[in-house]
Image (cartoon, helix red, strand yellow):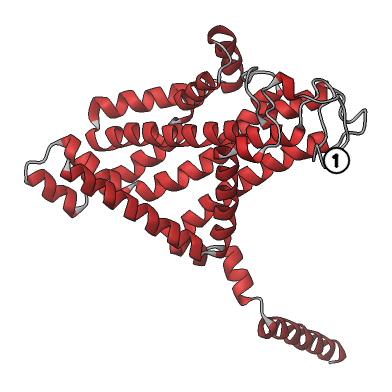
Amino acid sequence: MKSFMNGLKEMLSGIWGFIRKLWRHPKGRIGLIIVILLVVCALFAPWIAPYDPYDVTQRAQKGLSPSFQHLLGTTITTGQDIFSMLIYGTRVSLTIGVVTGVSLAFLGALMGICAGYIGGFADTLIMRIVDVLLVIPTLPLTIVLTNLFGRSYLMIILIFTLFGWTGLARVIRSLVLVLKNANYVKAAELAGASRWHIMMKHILPGTSHLLIMSTALTSAGIMVAEAGLSFLGLGDPTAISWGKMLAEAQSGGALLFGHWWWIIAPGIGIFLAVFSFMRIGLVMEEVFNPKMKQSSNIYKLFKNLNNTYIEEVFSSMSEAQILGVGGEQS
């Protein structure tokens, strides 16, 4: 129990230190603030939303325009408060994005570490599975599986996890092939440590920066994928999500009746969620790999693109023109 508490304290201190690094970065601070606001909306949705969109008795007249009672109006089809639907939809998008991102990171790390460190038959088997899954079209398979096993969001998370870990596993495997030749790993092997102990205590921490960055970027992509599936009618019909709001707006004729706010609201929600997680993921890459920014060609261009550089360019052009004129005269 004591060792577990010590491990938990170390993990919490590491997370807090990472959040502090992220907060110090200007771009990361923007993404972190947006994520915190989205999490607050998801956790305290019953207290923030003025109405309960799941309660049939709290529905008003259909197709109302924005007002003080209904900040974003009501839907044309059911009379639900759009602002309340927007707040409650945060729960579905964040849950699916974060849970799927963490699940993909866990499964991809496990398969990649096993393939890279154990090698042999395990490496061959895992890589052949990866090759097969990479060529399977995900969208048609998702449509078939959701029609067979139901359209709950748990099923969507399972489908995304089972078919989305392959790319990360390949990257982790290539990194593990380098880490397993490190001196501290060789020392642990000579000390008689088991393979599982080495993989969990020595190899996994070396890939943690890649896993954290991948989780943030993958969560953003999963949110877009969930919105697309819900827009196509493949989401959970009993839950409210931003993609489902867009689908209902299209089927209800929001553009036809001029209710553009019904479409703009969930669109802005999807954009903010994806933008914040993408921003955090890119900042993580800069934090964990500082050389990436300085080795970028765009960074070098803007670093050298100052007044002195521009004056040198124009002076060289002037000298070339003078030499050209002089050459013609001679």
- The image position of residue 256, as x and y in percent, is 92, 28
Quarter of the image that includes the N terminus: top left
> Residue at image x 12%, y 50%?
187
- In the image, residue 272 sits, relative to residue 61, either above or below, namely below
**Amino acid type for the residue under numbered disc 1:** Ser
Q: Residue furthest left?
A: 191
User: What is the quadrant of residue 80 in the picture?
Assistant: top right
Q: Nearer the viewer, residue 145 or 39?
A: 39
User: What is the quadrant of residue 142 in the picture?
Assistant: top right
Q: Is residue 310 visible?
A: yes
- The image position of residue 181, as x and y in percent, is 22, 48
- The image position of residue 213, as x and y in percent, is 46, 48
> Residue at image x 61%, y 19%?
236
> Residue at image x 65%, y 26%?
240
Q: Residue furthest right?
A: 257
254 with respect to 245 (left or right)? right
- The image position of residue 292, as x and y in percent, is 48, 61
227 with respect to 73 (left or right)? left
- In the image, residue 272 sits, relative to residue 319, either above or below, namely above
Would you call the spot at circle 1 few (<14 residues within 10 Å), some (14-19), or many (20 or more)?
A: few
In this figure, which residue is indicated by the disc labeled 1?
67
Which type of secondary structure does the marked residue at label 1 adopt? loop
Q: Nearer the viewer, residue 219 or 50?
A: 50
Q: Is residue 180 visible?
A: no
95 with respect to 328 (left or right)? left
